């Protein structure tokens, strides 16, 4: 195994919703330039885990988080500017959200917030991000149409384009393919493989085969616990240490 | 075999649904209640139609270019209503300048920031009560706070601020409603991109609520234009045959003028009174109709 | 990716609070001030009317005389008297009549609009009711004075047509749209599943309304009536213009009465600032404020109680 830089170090993470435990005692490292897969059945705490990584828990009144999350050497509970943290971390949620702005403004929003004003720069970012999200060809002639009126699949790609427009160092994808057709999913998966050269990706997925296709390493969550983390290939070769992981991978539950 | 069973079932059913005497009675009762409640609704609505008709018939002939744009004359027994119209515009404008920023800020706080705690409950209670306080009590407050304490004297400023406090709940409630109609997912998407709360409000929430806010503002304009009690002692004059030149002037106002000529000017011709009443009610209803039309137009124009 | 992108502020900007951060904090503070302004104003109203009225409460006020005497003679130089019983009777009689006139019709209209009317009819009725609510009170007063007055004189053959009956009807017409709107909201708040469940059991429409919808929406209807009472109680201009303004306990619907609100409106202009008369009028304001506060609070609690149930 090659020594790699740790992009994100999570230690003893506990998440509760008003006393109800959603995740407990999770410790794991995500390495720079890898796709880190997270699999597990619904309700296993995957989404709650993602939410804490960019400190969205601040906005959920009854959500409490304990443990430490270190991003690029910074303990995220101690940083002074949480908005800067969120700009470094792109998020794509399962349900697509096209903002009620023009398609162009949807993608240009994050760059504008970080201070880019030059029209030509913005044009370039919008075009590149939409291309990467496999949406450019469909919308290039109507960039001023409302993003919120696109079809579900298009909105999801718009969401991905928006996440990319933040120029993130870490990209969190939460079951992104739910609202996208298989062909587009494949195209986005190719993009993710390319992106890996530049950024780090955490991919939460309910499709075991998607994790197998993309993830370098994969973590298995079950009932709010991290069962195990391993090289994806090894896990799928049947070398999982825990029998529950094997059962899940083989589709015996989930 | 199967067929006959089916037939039996069908005929049994139709028998079950045949009108029984009880059923007929119920049907008649239902019709009766419908008619009764419909009549009650009519009784509420019809007098107003009649009243508006009377105002139109008696006041209509009075309304002319001359009536609208000339000064009252002969001790307010002749002439027009121009200074009152202009005065009402002053009052409306100045009170909007005061109430809209405060009201919108309050609504943004309540919709976007306020946690569910005692303070928020207190604010909501205060809004309800502010809307329920009698207008004459608002007038007393205006006298005590703006005319005397703040030293504005009886002036457009004091009257407008009194009106602003009174219409504040209207602006707050309408704005809060339209802010809350913007789906939460839009905010979360922005926050995830590293937008601050204010950036989120500015770029996504407010632009999509602005039309709802405008509806509320139009309503508060109509309310402001029609109020009399709050301005009687704070800035509206019985007779002030000049156009105001600053917010520290007194002014005539439409609502006050109608009160004055119908109670305090003996010998004011009916035509003048009805004309004034018709102008005022038309102004107010037009604005309300505009806000209603605007609202339904927006409802039809989906943005998500 | 995106080589031309502005280089990220090296090494990391996580501890740097930029302009946006400070603007956000400033806005948070500003809207908070806006938020508490409602509380500031409601307290301000109480403080300022109390400040002006306090001199009367600690001075000439005789609580027994205030509530039990019919003699309101604040301008008498030898023997001023501040009995508000007549004024209370005026307000009560006018508001009472207004409620008798408007409560049944408002609730009936709410039931019709909410449960019977559909589609276009329903929308137009709602718009009409909304427009009704928008008519300024001074216009209502004018209607009482100019249209109702001769009408009452003709119909009942009485010398004067302004009084309890006139202002009661006017006030009823004014309060009705508010009550109708709130009552209709209360009926709308009753979940459709209730109606469907009852209809599934074979209940007819009116049975559904009387056995299910009205009991379920009871609290909202009570609140609607309370707010209507509050509106009638606090109404000023219409009552001032249509009630005749004689201070007495009415014995017939054609009697002239004077309401609390109308008294303030009629006399404040003539009362020298700081005089006992002036302060007594502010004390009436305190009375109005406290009573409407209680009415609104009760209505709010009744509605909340309904929601919790």
Image (tube, coloured by chain):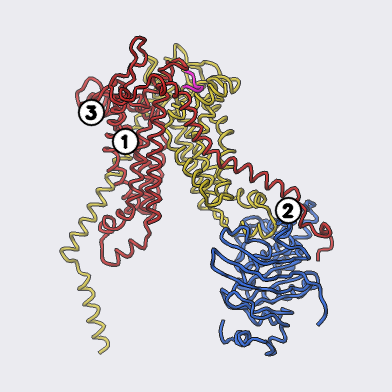
Q: Is residue C127 magenta?
A: no
Magenta-tinted stretch: B233-237
Which one is nearer the viewer's eye here, A78 or A128?
A78
Q: Tag 3's secondary structure?
A: loop
Tell me whether marks 1 and 2 sit on the same chain: no
Q: Tag 2's secondary structure?
A: helix
In the rendering, what colour is chain B? yellow
User: Residue C165 in the image: x percent, y percent?
Assistant: 26, 29
Which residue in the structure is indicated by mark 2? A113
Q: Is residue A159 above or below residue B171?
A: below
User: Residue B159 in the image: x percent, y percent?
Assistant: 52, 26
Q: Is residue B234 magenta?
A: yes
The residue sitting at 34% across, 29% down in the picture is B54
Q: Please rate how many residues cluster around mark 1, counting C-alpha atoms within 10 Å: few if below 14, some from 14 to 19, many from 20.
A: many
The prevailing secondary structure element of the residues shown in magenta is: loop
Numbered mark located on residue C253 in the image: 3
Numbered mark located on residue C172 in the image: 1
Q: Is residue C39 above or below residue B253?
A: below
Question: Which chain is the one coloured red?
Answer: C
The residue sitting at 34% across, 62% down in the picture is C194
Look at the image and tell me in which quarter the N terminus of chain A lies: bottom right
Numbered mark located on residue C7 in the image: none
| Distance Cα–Cα, label 1 vs label 2 | 55 Å
Which one is nearer the viewer's eye here, C235 or C45?
C45
Q: Is residue B1 above or below residue A55?
A: below
3 or 1: tag closer to the N-terminus: 1
In the rendering, what colour is chain A? blue
The residue sitting at 41% across, 32% down in the picture is C289
Residue A180 visible at all: no
Q: Which residue occupies the extreme left position in the image?
A: B21
């Amino acid at each position: 195994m090659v020594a790699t830089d740790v992009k994100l170090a999570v230690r003893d993470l506990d998440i509760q919703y008003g006393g109800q435990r959603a995740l407990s005692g999770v410790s794991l490292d995500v390495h720079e330039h890898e796709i880190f897969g997270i699999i597990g059945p619904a309700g296993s705490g995957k989404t709650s885990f993602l939410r804490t990584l960019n400190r969205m828990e601040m906005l959920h009144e009854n959500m409490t988080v304990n443990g430490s999350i270190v991003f690029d050497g910074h303990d995220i509970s101690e940083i002074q500017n949480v908005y800067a943290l969120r700009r470094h971390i792109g998020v794509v949620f399962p349900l697509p959200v096209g903002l009620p702005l023009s398609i162009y403004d949807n993608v240009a929003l994050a760059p504008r917030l970080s201070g880019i004003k030059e029209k030509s720069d913005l044009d370039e970012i919008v075009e590149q991000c939409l291309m990467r999200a496999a949406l450019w060809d469909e919308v290039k002639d109507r960039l001023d149409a409302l993003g919120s009126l696109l079809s579900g699949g298009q909105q999801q790609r718009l969401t991905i384009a928006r996440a990319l427009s933040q120029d993130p160092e870490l990209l969190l994808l939460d079951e992104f393919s739910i609202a996208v057709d298989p062909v587009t999913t494949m195209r986005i998966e190719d993009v993710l493989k390319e992106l890996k050269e530049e950024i780090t990706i955490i991919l939460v997925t309910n499709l075991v085969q998607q994790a197998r296709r993309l993830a370098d390493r994969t973590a298995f969550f079950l009932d709010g616990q991290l069962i195990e983390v391993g090289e994806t290939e090894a896990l799928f070769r049947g070398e999982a240490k825990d029998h529950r992981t094997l059962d899940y991978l083989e589709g015996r539950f989930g | 075999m199967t067929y006959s069973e089916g037939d039996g079932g069908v005929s049994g059913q139709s028998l079950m649904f045949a009108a029984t005497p009880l059923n007929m009675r119920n049907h008649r009762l239902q019709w009766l209640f419908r008619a009764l409640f419909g009549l009650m609704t009519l009784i509420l609505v019809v007098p107003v139609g009649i009243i508006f008709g009377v105002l139109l018939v008696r006041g209509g002939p009075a309304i002319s270019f001359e009536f609208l744009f000339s000064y009252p004359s002969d001790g307010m027994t002749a002439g027009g209503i121009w200074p009152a119209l202009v005065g009402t515009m002053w009052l409306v404008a100045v009170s909007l300048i005061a109430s809209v920023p405060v009201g919108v800020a309050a609504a943004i706080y309540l919709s976007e920031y306020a946690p569910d705690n005692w303070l928020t409950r207190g604010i909501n209670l205060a809004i309800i009560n502010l809307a329920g306080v009698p207008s004459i009590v608002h007038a007393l407050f205006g006298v005590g706070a703006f005319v005397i304490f703040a030293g504005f004297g009886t002036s457009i400023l004091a009257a407008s601020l009194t009106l602003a406090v009174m219409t504040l709940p209207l602006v707050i409630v309408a704005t809060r409603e339209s802010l809350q109609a913007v789906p939460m997912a839009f905010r979360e998407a922005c926050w995830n991109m590293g937008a601050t709360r204010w950036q989120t409000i500015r770029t996504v929430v407010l632009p999509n609520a602005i039309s709802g806010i405008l509806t509320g503002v139009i309503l508060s304009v109509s309310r402001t234009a029609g109020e009399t009690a709050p301005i009687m002692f704070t800035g509206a004059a019985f007779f002030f045959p000049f156009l105001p030149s600053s917010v520290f002037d007194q002014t005539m106002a439409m609502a006050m003028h109608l009160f004055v000529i119908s109670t305090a000017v003996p010998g004011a011709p009916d035509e003048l009174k009805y004309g004034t009443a018709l102008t005022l009610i038309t102004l107010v209803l037009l604005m309300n109709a505009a806000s209603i039309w605007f609202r339904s137009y927006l409802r039809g124009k989906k943005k998500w | 990716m995106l080589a031309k992108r502005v280089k990220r502020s090296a090494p990391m900007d996580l501890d740097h609070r930029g302009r946006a951060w400070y603007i956000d904090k400033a806005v948070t503070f500003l809207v908070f001030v806006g938020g508490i302004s409602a509380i500031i104003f409601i307290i301000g109203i109480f403080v300022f009317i109390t400040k002006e009225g306090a001199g009367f409460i600690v001075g000439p006020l005789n609580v027994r005389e205030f509530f039990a005497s019919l003699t309101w003679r604040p301008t008498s130089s030898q023997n001023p008297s501040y009995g508000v019983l007549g004024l209370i009777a005026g307000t009560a009689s006018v508001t009472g009549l207004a409620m008798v006139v408007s409560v049944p019709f408002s609730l009936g209209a709410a039931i019709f609009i909410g449960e019977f009317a559909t589609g276009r009819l329903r929308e137009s009725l709602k718009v009409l009711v909304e427009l009704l609510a928008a008519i300024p009170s001074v216009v209502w007063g004018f209607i009482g004075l100019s249209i109702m007055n001769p009408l009452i004189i003709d119909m009942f053959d009485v010398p004067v047509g302004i009084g309890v009956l006139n202002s009661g009807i006017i006030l009823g017409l004014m309060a009705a749209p508010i009550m109708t709107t709130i009552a209709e909201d209360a009926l709308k708040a009753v979940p459709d599943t209730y109606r469907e469940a009852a209809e599934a059991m074979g209940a007819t429409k009116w049975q559904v309304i009387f056995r299910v919808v009205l009991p379920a929406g009871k609290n909202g209807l009570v609140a609607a009536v309370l707010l209507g009472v509050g509106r009638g109680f606090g109404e000023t201009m219409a009552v001032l213009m249509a009630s005749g303004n004689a201070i007495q306990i009415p014995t017939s619907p054609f009697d002239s009465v004077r309401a609390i609100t109308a008294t303030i409106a009629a006399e404040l202009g003539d009362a020298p600032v700081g005089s006992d008369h002036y302060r007594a009028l502010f004390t009436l304001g305190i009375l109005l404020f406290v009573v409407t506060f209680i009415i609104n609070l009760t209505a709010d609690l009744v509605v909340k109680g309904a929601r919790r149930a």
